[in-house]
Image (tube, rainbow, N blue to C red):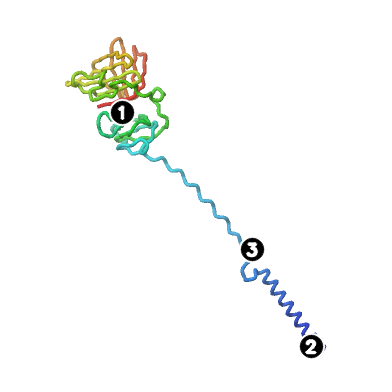
Amino acid sequence: MRPWMIVVTTAAVVIVIGVAAVLVFRAFSGGDGEPTAAQESTSPAPAAAPAPSQAAPRELPTNGILKVGSDITPGEYATTPTGSAPGYWERLSCLSGDFECVITNDLVEGQGYLTVAPTDLAVRVSDLRLEKTSDAVVTASGRAPAPAPDVPGSSPDTQGFATSPRCNSDDPAVVTAETTQSRVVICETGAGRLYYKGARISDGAAIEIDDPTPSGSGYEASGEAGTVYRIGPDALVITQGGQQIAQEPTLSYRTR
């Protein structure tokens, strides 16, 4: 019986060694044939997505009506005609199509500038390219526009102002303008002759000058003693003997 016990014991040892080998193999192989954490390969992290490029400034239409606040924002714009003919713009206080809606307007030959105020309702452009240069709203004098004075008759009609100045008889106004200190109308007779009428707001002092002539985007009238009055969309400039004696920023400028 002793030899049989040795054989059994030897077989048991072989079995134990075999089981231990299997356990060791399973421990290193992850137990189910799948790679262990130490064996798993790490893929490179995905590259960060490129930052979206900044959108180019939106190009404004060259024809039509642009509503302030939605289609166009207040500020200063460089203006350039789209073709060889002059371009045109007008700032609007209403959209009824009446003459009274036009705050100011201009024909543009070459390059010019347009200032859109926060109080404007809209801007009408015709064959004109607009490119914004500044968010600031200033006049030619470099100051923000002053509010229009609260004076009876300050709203013009087709003949000028209800009080003064106003075109004679039934002559129509070609230009009506109001500055910080004055009001101006340029009127046309039935024969096609022009005349200039101005009035100082503070005391009503008035002047009338025959035959004003176009000058740039406005008109020029030569009075007595070498005094010249130049009225335009930006300012009324008064010179005497070639020397400037006054400059009044324009608050409104309307043309027929």
Looking at the image, is mark 2 or mark 1 earlier in the sequence?
2
Q: Earlier in the sequence, mark 3 or mark 2?
A: 2
Viewport quadrant of the N terminus: bottom right
Q: Look at 46% across and 45% down and name the residue there.
A: 53
Label disc, if present, on residue 4 of the rendered structure: 2
In this rendering, which labeled residue sits more in front, label 1 or label 3?
1
Q: Give the left or right position of residue 48, taking residue 150 as reference.
A: right
The local crowd at label 2, few if under 14, some if 14 to 19, many if 20 or more residues have their Cα within 10 Å, is few
Residue 81 locus on image (x, y percent): 32, 33
Q: In the image, is residue 237 above or below residue 121?
A: above
Q: CA distance from mark 1 to mark 3?
A: 78 Å
State the image coordinates of residue 134 (x, y, percent, origin top left).
42, 32
Report, in whole angstroms, how far the alpha carbon at label 2 lies from the one at label 1: 123 Å
Give the residue type at disc 2. Answer: Trp
Q: Amino acid at mark 3?
A: Ala
Estimate the spatial distance between the alpha carbons at disc 3 and disc 2, rounded to whole Å. 47 Å
Would you name the residue on which mark 3 appears?
37
